[in-house]
Image (spheres, rainbow, N blue to C red):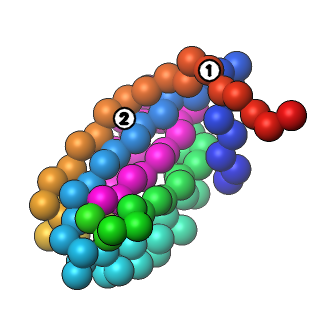
């Protein structure tokens, strides 16, 4: 899996923002990384990138899917549903939104 952000790459991007208590950030990220290593093999999933804020209060999950059908199929799997339950026990709020890349600028 390789994350490529390019307006010419036709992928569906889901960016999810998590509001996390700082004391829950480490267990939250450990859980997300472990699950990403398993769920990352799902057909139609292009990449998963996890980020955390320096203050430990926010996390972002940047996920690319081949298309809407791949995303819908992924979200209906028992593994994803189980992850969602675990996520909700460690975060204050979850805000998933779908995006398309419209522009990128690279060095050089």
Residue 57 bears which disc, if any?
Answer: none
- Looking at the figure, which quarter contains the C terminus? top right
Q: Secondary structure at mark 1?
A: loop
Q: Secondary structure at mark 2?
A: helix
Q: Residue furthest right?
A: 108
Quarter assignment of residue 29: bottom left
Q: Magenta residues, as a range? A: 58-82
The answer to whether residue 87 is seen in the rendering is no
Q: Is residue 78 magenta?
A: yes
Quarter assignment of residue 86: bottom left
Residue 72 bears which disc, if any?
Answer: 2
Quarter assignment of residue 41: bottom right
Q: Is residue 27 magenta?
A: no
Residue 69 is situated, as x and y percent measured from the top left of the image, at 44, 28
> Is residue 67 placed above or below 32 in the rendered structure?
above
Closer to the camera in the image, 54 or 88: 54
Closer to the camera in the image, 72 or 63: 63
Residue at 53% from the left image edge and 40% from the top image edge: 64
Residue 97 is situated, as x and y percent measured from the top left of the image, at 32, 33
Residue 33 is situated, as x and y percent measured from the top left of the image, at 47, 71
Residue 66 is situated, as x and y percent measured from the top left of the image, at 57, 32
Residue at 57% from the left image edge and 18% from the top image edge: 102
Image-based side of 104 in relation to 94, left or right: right
Q: Earlier in the sequence, mark 1 or mark 2?
A: 2
Residue at 54% from the left image edge and 68% from the top image edge: 37
The answer to whether residue 72 is seen in the rendering is yes
- How many numbered discs, if any? 2
> Is residue 30 placed above or below 105 in the rendered structure?
below
Q: Which residue lies under the disc numbered 1?
A: 103
């Amino acid at each position: 899996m390789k994350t490529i952000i390019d307006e010419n790459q036709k992928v569906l991007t889901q960016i999810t923002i998590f509001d996390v208590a700082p004391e829950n950030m480490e267990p939250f990220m450990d859980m997300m990384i472990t699950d990403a290593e398993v769920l990352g093999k799902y057909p139609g999933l292009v990449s998963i990138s996890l980020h955390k804020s320096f203050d430990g209060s926010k996390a972002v999950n940047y996920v690319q899917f081949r298309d809407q059908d791949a995303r819908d199929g992924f979200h209906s799997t028992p593994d994803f549903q189980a992850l969602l339950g675990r996520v909700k026990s460690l975060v204050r709020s979850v805000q998933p939104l779908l995006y398309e890349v419209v522009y990128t600028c690279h060095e050089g």
